[in-house]
Structure formats: structure tokens, C-alpha cells
Amino acid sequence: MRRVLLLITLIIITVAVVVVAIYLKRRRLPPTQFKWQAYVSTLAGDGAPVFHEDSPPTQSGFSDPFGVAIAADKITKEGALVTFAGSNEGFADGSPGQFNTPSGLAIDATGNVYIADTGNNRIRKVTPAGSVSTVAGNGVAGYVDGPAASAQFDAPVGVAVDTTGNVYVADTYNDRIRKIAVDGQVTTVAGGGRPGFVDGTAMNALFDTPCGLVVAADGTLIVADTGNEKLRRISTTGQVTTFEVRFDEETNRTWLNSPVGLALTHDGFLYVTERDRGVVVQVKPDGAACVLIGNGSGYGDGARDVARLNHPAGIAINASNGELVVADGANYLVRKISTTDSKSSPPTEVLPRLTPETLGEKNLLWPLDPQTQPHEVVATMGEVRGSYDSTDSRDHLHSGLDVFGAYDDVVRAIRSEKVTSPLPTWGFGELSEGLNVGLILYIHMHVGRDKDSKPFNDPRFISVKGDDGKINRIRVRRGTRFRPGDAVGTVNRMYHVHLIVGPSGAQVNPLFFSPLGFVDTVKPTIEKDGVQLFDESGARLTGKAGDKLIVNGRLRIVVDAFDRTNMNAERRRLGLYSLGYQVFDAAGNTPAPGFTDRRLTMLFNRLPSDEATKIVYAAESGITVYGSKTTRFLYELTNTVRDGHARADLWDTTALPKGDYMLRIIVADFSGNETQQDIPITKQ
């Protein structure tokens, strides 16, 4: 009998939960190695946020992979990917059953799968035969202990099961840990019922949005206390303590960031997914920790320095060989972490595949009224931004589209989506306050309330009050659905809505989705003396032969240019979408050798990382909002920016035969309006 891999998917319209089943040969397990050499490969999924089954599994699709577990003694044809349970979004027991935003998974000794059915406020069970039943919860979001059928949970995200069949629940928005005993009685293990951070006895302890948990061999619970960015322990006597995590010097940080998924080895090592950082952390029993895999949010197979995950959530261990399986949420993939470098071929498309076709969105609504009519765009993707905390005018890149709005204008949802993050709001009362609904981020607004902080009359927004009785936070549950036109907040004193499409590390240009009525017929502007050439030492080329600039060696080309749309005032300066250059004969008609086609070096279709800012922009670039005297976009034209990546480069003129030429600079906006400028040059 072959030992093969079985992928079983639990699919709910917009949600996919993956169970990976592996036949385990019984043998003595070796000790876990700390800091083992790990490699990431893709196990299943094609990177598009659309559910579909296909073969091989890497051609199948998931839309919100979150939970993952590994079972024993399941044999099937290698590589098969099948729907295990679930159909349309909803609630139904039986076969195939219905779920609403299933999240964490756990498997008991007999192969039953337990599911935190977040959107239904229930804990569900699927037998090995695929029959779905409700373990506990009456479907009402609330807090009630007692018999399983009348108990209440509030959007539980995590679930675990011990060796005797007791089920433990991370009751996420009740900020409690609950237990479902074998006899069906639901009790509270720990948590005071409000977000906070307090160690101590069970009912006095406080958690903040706990999302994951595991049961150790001695019965101790370990909790991913997501909102507190900590791991917590609950002893069998109910004492809650903080599990102190100490990173090595190489990691250069001191805390966890949004821990969500947990997996525990036979000898007490923990694996933790950090959703917002996109990494997997390994923690020794004594708390020593290292980053096992992940180099910032994004997509990439391979070793730690190149591997990237995006919003990893559930994680599980294959006990037979120590390999890990991770639900890579925002890449819409299931990934494997092992000691073997698969050396897989890179995908032919940029992942995740976020296009008008995969999103079914070809005419995006505007986030302000009227939603079907154009509004002024006051910033575009890829523009340079400075830092309020320093004099650095090239600190980061602008990550989306800014739409002008008046203070207290209602911000509305632009597409139908569900909240996938357990913590989708941030920055209460700050200028950066925002809400993440699926692929869309709405920033610079009062979330769920008006300018006076009066909450909307909408149960989807949960007000959290501090000890002073004042609202200090707005919560939105994972699984909450918003539809086009739903109010999500009001514009704050930034006087615009910052709209981002796509997760960190994979933001796409919102203009791809053709906002309704958007028209731009204005050509970009290249400033006077806006094309400058520099040698490798940084000295500007000024030598001329007649009217022709003398070029030699490896050169930088810097272009000072900006864009403007029909709705912008003369003072407004926007960033460009694409830039390039081409060399022609002296008359500007025939391409020079090596320049048959334009060298389109910069394309802002996806956002590069902030480390790319100084690759994209030359010194003295900046905008007035961050303290620069003027808004200037000085593009390093010979560097390459495309598909979310950036690379420094130079124009090597040594390959150009001696003679006179015309250097043509081409800049364009997203609408295709193009401006060219010719620079006479000579190669001597």
C-alpha cells in the first residue's frame, strides 16, 4: 500500500477550508530540530480567489483558505482534490451540509473533523463519511454556557480537541476560551468577556480576539491571543499566564505580530503563523524563537530568504516527517514547508491572480456618493511618500488610489465581499483609521460612525468601550458581509478615501477595474530640464558636441514628470503609470541597434515593497504633505519596476556604436495619454 497525499477541501462559495490527510506509518518520532532548513512549495491552488476543482491540485482554486489539519489512515489516489463537505453559504446539517465562513479545524482520534463555523456562531462536526452535524451553538451571536443546543458563541475562529474528545473553542469576539465536554455541556475555561490583557485566574484573565489554540499532552491549552500579539497558557487548574517568546538576534525583533495559527509537535515545539507579517515562527518549549520561513508578505516558493506567504492562517504538522501544511490565505493557496527544495518552476502569472476577470469586477463603484459618477482622484499608486517621523522624503510608496471627499462624507462599500481578517479595523480616532473588507481597504475614515463618533445603527459594527465608558474601538467580525452601497464609515480630516485593492505585498492598481465614469484625456508633463543623465559616480552629464549631449559608459536617466486628470486643478500633481526610453538615429526615425522596441522600464501595475522607494525615485523627490517644498516625482528611469518588483540598473552605452542619436523619453498615464521628449546625444 502506497503512502500518498489526500487533499480534502471543505468549500463554501467564497470560503475554502482544507483538510490534508496523509497515511502515517507508525514509528518512533525523531526530536524536532530548532531552526531547520525549510523550503516552501505550493501544494494546491492556482492563486485566483475563485473556487473550482481541477486536477492537478495546483490548478484548483480557493477563495479564503483558513483552516488546515492533518489526519491519519486516509488513502486515495495521489493528488486527488475533492469537496469533503459544504455547498452554498448558509446553515444545514446532513450531507453535504452548509457553512458560513468556516475557520479553524481540528481532528479527533477517530477521524471526525471539528470546524469553527464562524459566520454561523457554531461548532460543527464532519464524520469521515462526510455527514455534517452541529456540536454546539444555537446560531445566535452571544455568550451562554450550558447544554450544547442552547449555548451561544460569538463568531468563534479557533478549535482544538483533546485525546478524550473534549472540544476547546477560541470564542473570538467573546474574548473567551470555551470547552464542549463529551456530554455536550459548554463551559467557560478562561476569559473575562472583554478585550484586554491580564494574566491570573480563569475568569479574571483577559484576552483580545483569540483565534487559535492547541492542547498539550498534559492538558495545558496554548492560545494565539491575536489582538494582544502574544501566546498565552491556560493550566489545567485555570491559571492563565503569558508564554514569553524570545527571538534570536538574527530575527531582530521582540514580539509576535498577529499570531493566528498554532501547531504543536510531539516534543513541545510550536509553529505559529503571523498573519500580518506573512511568516511562520518556530518556538522552542523554553520560548526561544526564530522565523522558520517567510520574508515579508507576498508570494514565492523556495528557501527562507525568497519564500513569501500572504496572510497565513491555519497550520498543521505531518507527524510522520515533520513537514508543515499552511493555509496561505491571501495567495489563495495551500503551501507545504519541508526540508526538500522542490525547485518548482515559477508561475507564468503574477500571484495572487487579481484581475477584473478573476474578481468579476470590470466597472468599480466609487466609495463616495454618487457611486456611479466620477470623483476627483488626488493620488495614484506608486507615488513617493515621506515620513512624519524623519526628514526622509522617500520613505515609502503610495499603495492605492485617493478619492477626494469632504469631512464627514459617508464612505460606502464598492463591491460585495466578506471580512476575512479576524482584526479588520485599526487606528481608532487616528488619521490612518481604516477597515479591510476582503480585498478592499478603506482608509482615512471614522469606521462605522460619524464625525462625532456616534456609531451607525448597524449591528455589523460593534462598539468597544474603555473603563471611562467611552468608545475606544470598533470591531467587525470575520465573516461579516458588506454589499455595494453599504455605509462603512465617514471621511476624516485627511479629506479623502484611500482605496487599496489587494493584500499587502500584492496590491494592484485600482484603475485596472475601470472606476465608473473615470475619464482622463490630459497628457502627462515632463518638467523643464526634466531629463537628466548621470554617470556611475553620480555626476551629471553636461558635456556637449554642438547641441548633442555626449554619452559614454553606464548611465542613469532621471526624469522629472507628473500627471493630471480632467478633474484636477492646475496645482495637482499625480504619479505616472508607465515610463520608458528608446534610442533612434539622429533624425529620430529608425531605432538604434538594440532598441528595436521601447525599453518600458517602469510599470505601476502592482506595488513594489517600500524598500523599492529609493530605486524608483531619485533624491529630492517628495510631496508637500510630508514636508517637501514642492511635489516632485524624479523617476530613476533606467531602473526596473514591474509586477510588484524593483531592480536597480543602468543604461550601458558601450554597446551603442559611435555616432549621433536621438534619446526618446516616453511617459504615460493609466489612460494611455503619452508624452515624449527627444534628447539629441552623441556617442564618441
Image (cartoon, grey):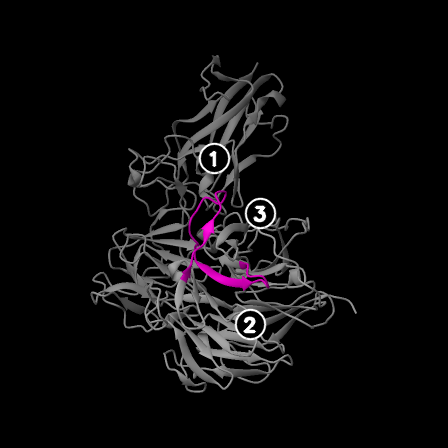
Q: Looking at the figure, which quarter contains the C terminus?
A: top right
The answer to which of 254 and 405 lies nearer the viewer is 254
Image position of 657 (left or right of 670): right
Q: How many angstroms separate mark 1 from mark 3 (CA)?
A: 24 Å
Which residue corresponds to mark 2?
106
Residue 591 at x, y percent in the picture: 60, 28
- Badge 1 local density, few (<14 within 10 Å), some, or many (20+)? many
Q: Earlier in the sequence, mark 1 or mark 2?
A: 2
Label 3 SS = loop
Relative height, residue 205 to residue 546 (above, below) = below
Structural distance between the alpha carbons of marks 1 and 2: 46 Å
Asked if 262 appears above or below 85 in the picture, the reply is: above
Residue 102, how many percent across, how many down? Answer: 50, 72
Amino acid at pointer 1: Ile
Lateral position of residue 92 relative to residue 301, left or right = left
Question: Which residue is tagged 3?
Answer: 304
Numbered disc in front, either 1 or 2 = 2
